[in-house]
Image (cartoon, rainbow, N blue to C red):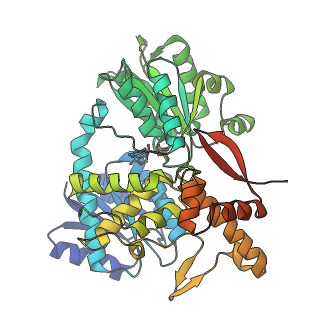
Amino acid sequence: MSDILIVDDERDIRELIGDILQDEGFETRLAANSDECLKEIDAGVPALMILDIWLKDSDMDGIDILKHVKREHPEVPIIIISGHGNIEIAVAAIKQGAYDFIEKPFNIDQLMVVITRAMETSRLRRENATLKRSGSGDLEMIGVSAAFKQLKSNLEKVTKSNGRVMLTGGAGVGKEVAARFIHAGSERREAPFVTVSSATIEPDRMEEVLFGRETPERGVEKGLLEEANGGVIYFDEVADMPLGTQSKILRVLVDQRFTRVGGNARVSVDLRVVSSTSRDLLAEIEAGRFREELYHRLNVVPIEVPALEKRREDIPELARYFIEKLNREQGLPLRDLSEDAAAMLQTMAWPGNVRQLKNVIERVLILGDSTGLIEADELPNEDGVREDDGRAMLSPAIATLPLREAREVFEREYLLTQINRFGGNISRTATFVGMERSALHRKLKSLGVVTGNKQGGRMAYVEETD
Ligand SMILES: Nc1ncnc2c1ncn2[C@@H]1O[C@H](COP(=O)(O)OP(=O)(O)OP(=O)(O)O)[C@@H](O)[C@H]1O
């Protein structure tokens, strides 16, 4: 398994990439559309795929192919090629499990760097798979903010019990890390930790995957529930589970027993259940997509994993942790962050949370210099203010306002971000923004930013609403 499948409807591009990769010593296969692509995969699973997101004259587009391959062969890294300016689509592809993306027109060195890293990551992933399954991989949960300490203390309280936990929070906030933390601190730590990612399992294979099956030809094949016996089963994005499977899981939770698909024997399991969701489950229940009874069974202890922008103090710590980890595991350069770069990371928007931060750090280490401090200008541009032809472009929210109001919007946003970054500490914020403490208080008051509840000994600041 060392070949690369290149899927692009433009013949020149797929042949060019193919030739270059062959010169670099890789074996390559080419496909012009989804049919050819699926045939190639049936003939043999490639080590890596390079996939154009827009495919003309093709039954499936790139995203569909991506979803299909991630479901059937999750171990194959996929690098997406997207058109210039299609950043949203590329981000959507990463959320669906693409390893990385490159924009057309791309530079060959950049492509080679991404391919080399993807191959290396995939090799390490295969090597680590057995270790992770047994739950004995190293587990580090990094953070220093009050919100993070609160999370950790909530998790510590539940580790010793056997109670079912529902972790809530947006994409990439660290829900799985939190679930592993519960497992690692519990008496079940030597037993398996098994993840069920409903989004990546074909709905009609869900029951086989969970409950296993019995056939005359192959005998008994264990499902994930049996593999997790004695340990923790983690239902990642539980709202993605088909309704039919939800009812069956509910029954397993009630009697801790089930039958394998095609079998008659009742199998008993001893499981601790941890689930996660980034969606509002009550709304899902309302819409008839989630079973209320299952919700009550799974939601015994709800714990929120806070968004990264609610704990900006953690950002430099996390960034340094990722730099060190990427150096140790992948040999990327060990560089520290300059103060400006750390501050810039703390003020950026992080819709993809910790996972996005990790990706940004990885990209900077791959594409940037190999030594010296990481400087602010090596970081990607902040959301809202885009650099275009060297000119800063304003976000529409600000660009459409008169100067006075635009300034207020900016000041409010800026000060809230800084206060959050310094964990609610007004003196440190005042020093950083270059204002007297009392002047900062007055400014906040005039902007309608008021002090809220005291959290962990610090004041929380919120925007005043009518
Ligand atoms: N506190 C933390 N310390 C160290 N690494 C973290 C922390 N939180 C998250 N990560 C890392 O960030 C990445 C995303 O975390 P994780 O997979 O747990 O998020 P998630 O909320 O389960 O995401 P999703 O549900 O979107 O898949 C992982 O690589 C994880 O190791």
Lateral position of residue 213 relative to residue 443, left or right: left
Q: Looking at the figure, which quarter contains the N terminus?
A: bottom left
Residue 429 point in image, percent of width and height: 57, 60
* Number of numbered discs: 0
Q: In this view, does 269 lie above or below 333?
A: above
- State the image quarter where residue 297 is shown: top right
Lateral position of residue 281 relative to residue 73, left or right: right
Q: Is residue 2 above or below residue 12?
A: above
Lateral position of residue 216 relative to residue 276, left or right: left
Lateral position of residue 299 relative to residue 179, left or right: right
Q: Is residue 330 above or below residue 114?
A: above
Residue at the image point whose x is 28% and y is 29% from the top: 134
Q: Can residue 320 be seen in this view?
A: yes
| Foreground pick, 40 / 332 | 332
- State the image quarter where residue 426 is shown: bottom right
Residue 364 point in image, percent of width and height: 35, 68
Residue at the image point whose x is 65% and y is 33% from the top: 290
Residue at the image point whose x is 45% and y is 31% from the top: 234
Q: Can residue 59 be seen in this view?
A: no
Residue 428 point in image, percent of width and height: 54, 58
| Foreground pick, 115 / 456 | 456
